[in-house]
């Protein structure tokens, strides 16, 4: 409602502008008998009508920035007041590890941690729940059902390893938080950096390191596979934007100097000009483009040189990612320094990625447990039970019809048919007892003898087969 008047196409007499005009008349602020205080909030002060901010109206502005570490700790205390927390939960550590989070982000963090704990039937939240919730908010939700080819998985591992290694080698970078090849959101893999403290400005060295880190994945692909993929498209976009900002906004180019070039044009709907006025020449535009390209080319060469120098570390980190799927910053540093990681417990950390080779093995041998760390069952019956005990009835873990269920159902049908055939093939006999009662004897159940019928002449108990033995006319009946 308070957006600048005259914005967009059309006249200035629409309903919104008329409402704003009446509001401005009512809140001139010079009446002595008025005791009303009007408070409003916006996250776009740049598009407000100038008349709203004149003296007597909204002439006092209170800026509410994102909370610092103390504010985050206090916000976490408020939102976790009614949530049972484990003994290992330290809100100070969580507040330190969430720079840039707003109050709503912190509330969402507690809610996500509570959901993760509820899924595992926990009585209280622990630090693992908060770490998982933070990863979900920062990197997106895991896409475990996505199927990869082994070549794509290897390419992703080296791409992310390139980012992670450059983060550890370049100066003035944010600490490496986690690197993973598990798809999250729209990304096939992610390398996450997390500053130790709140940062409000960056110097030239730090920005140049950021651009070089962005090209770490592309450089690793070129070194290992001698080709590029589309996986670096977002890295290129971010690096180009940052390099152009260094030249045009931050004055970090020796050739251009401290000049603000190419102010961003404003859209018509917020009341700005149709076309941004150009205040620089064609020659200056060519210099800007050349300077941006120089910064990007230098960053790419720097990334390539560092990765070739530490090629052994690149191989170790990529192989560890293929084995473990996710590495922490400390684990990546140990691998880069040539140290080995402790053995991976696949029972506690089962694999989450699915490859085309897994699907081929499943189609050939039926669905397996999918976890390389699980001990194989000792017999066939235990194997079938282990394959199907955690699956939905009739479907496997990928939502497809479950071959194990089908085989079990077919086996059951075969048993029923065999039992029915045995009943039909069993010999039957009918005879009259001395009391005139008609008896029918058949081997209805395995292991049971047919009923005995007293012989009319001798009185001995005989089965129908014994009684009719040698009788060419078969059993007597009336």
Image (cartoon, grey):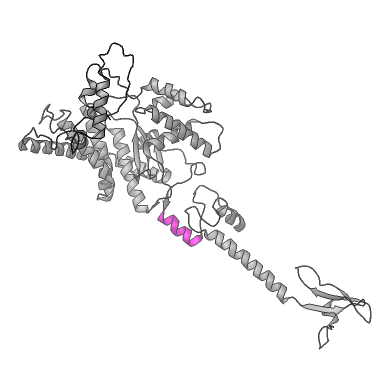
Quadrant occupied by the N terminus: top left
Residue 406, given in percent of the width and then of the height, sits at: 55, 62
Residue at x 22% of width, y 32% of height:
208
One can see residue 97 in this view: no
Left or right, 204 with reference to 412: left
Left or right, 161 with reference to 267: right
**Is 361 part of what is drawn in magenta?**
yes
Which of the 4 image quarters holds residue 27? Answer: top left
Q: In the rendered structure, which segment of residues is drawn in magenta?
A: 355-365
Which of the 4 image quarters holds residue 23? Answer: top left
**Is 120 part of what is drawn in magenta?**
no
Image vertical order of residue 358 relative to residue 51, above or below: below
Left or right, 124 with reference to 102: right
Q: Nearer the viewer, residue 278 or 94?
A: 278
Residue 76, given in percent of the width and then of the height, sits at: 44, 25
Q: Residue furthest right?
A: 458
Q: Nearer the viewer, residue 347 or 252?
A: 252
Question: Looking at the magenta stretch, what is its main secondary structure?
Answer: helix
Image vertical order of residue 50 relative to residue 189, above or below: above
Q: Residue furthest bottom?
A: 472
One can see residue 273 in this view: yes
């Amino acid at each position: 409602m308070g957006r600048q008047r005259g914005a967009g196409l059309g006249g200035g007499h629409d309903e919104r502008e008329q409402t704003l005009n009446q509001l401005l008349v009512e809140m001139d602020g010079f009446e002595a008998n008025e005791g009303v205080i009007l408070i409003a909030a916006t996250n776009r002060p740049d598009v407000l009508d100038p008349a709203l901010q004149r003296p007597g109206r909204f002439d006092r502005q209170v800026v509410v920035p994102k909370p610092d570490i103390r504010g985050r700790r206090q916000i976490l205390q408020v939102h976790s007041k009614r949530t049972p927390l484990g003994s290992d939960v330290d809100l100070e550590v969580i507040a330190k590890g969430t720079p840039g989070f707003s109050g709503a982000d912190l509330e969402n963090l507690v809610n996500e941690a509570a959901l993760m704990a509820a899924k595992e039937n926990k009585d209280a939240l622990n630090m693992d729940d908060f770490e998982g919730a933070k990863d979900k908010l920062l990197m997106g939700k895991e896409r475990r059902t996505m199927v990869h080819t082994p070549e794509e998985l290897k390419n992703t591992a080296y791409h992310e390893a390139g980012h992670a290694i450059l983060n550890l080698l370049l100066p003035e970078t944010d600490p490496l938080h986690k690197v993973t090849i598990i798809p999250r959101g729209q990304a096939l893999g992610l390398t996450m950096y997390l500053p130790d403290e709140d940062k409000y400005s960056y110097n030239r060295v730090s920005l140049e390191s950021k651009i070089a880190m962005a090209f770490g994945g592309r450089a690793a692909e070129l070194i290992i596979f001698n080709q590029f993929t589309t996986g670096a498209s977002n890295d290129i976009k971010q690096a180009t934007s940052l390099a152009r900002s260094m030249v045009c906004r931050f004055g970090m180019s020796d050739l251009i100097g401290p000049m603000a070039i190419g102010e961003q044009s404003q859209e018509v709907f917020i009341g700005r000009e149709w076309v941004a006025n150009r205040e620089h020449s064609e020659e200056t535009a060519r210099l800007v483009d050349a300077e941006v390209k120089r910064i990007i080319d230098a960053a790419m060469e720097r990334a390539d040189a560092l990765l070739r120098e530490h090629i052994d570390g690149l191989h170790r980190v990529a192989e560890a990612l293929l084995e473990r799927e996710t590495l922490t910053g400390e684990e990546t540093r140990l691998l880069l320094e040539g140290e080995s990681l402790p053995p991976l417990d696949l029972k506690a950390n089962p694999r989450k990625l699915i490859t085309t080779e897994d699907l081929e093995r499943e189609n050939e041998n039926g669905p397996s447990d999918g976890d390389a760390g699980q001990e194989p069952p000792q017999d066939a019956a235990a194997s079938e039970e282990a394959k199907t005990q955690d699956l939905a009835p009739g479907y496997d873990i990928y939502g497809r019809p479950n071959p194990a269920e089908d085989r079990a159902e077919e086996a059951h049908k075969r048993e029923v048919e065999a039992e029915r055939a045995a009943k039909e093939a069993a010999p039957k006999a009918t005879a009259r007892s001395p009391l005139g009662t008609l008896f029918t004897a058949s081997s209805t159940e395995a292991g049971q003898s047919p009923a005995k019928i007293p012989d009319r002449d001798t009185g001995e108990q005989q089965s129908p087969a014994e009684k009719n033995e040698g009788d060419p006319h078969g059993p007597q009946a009336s």
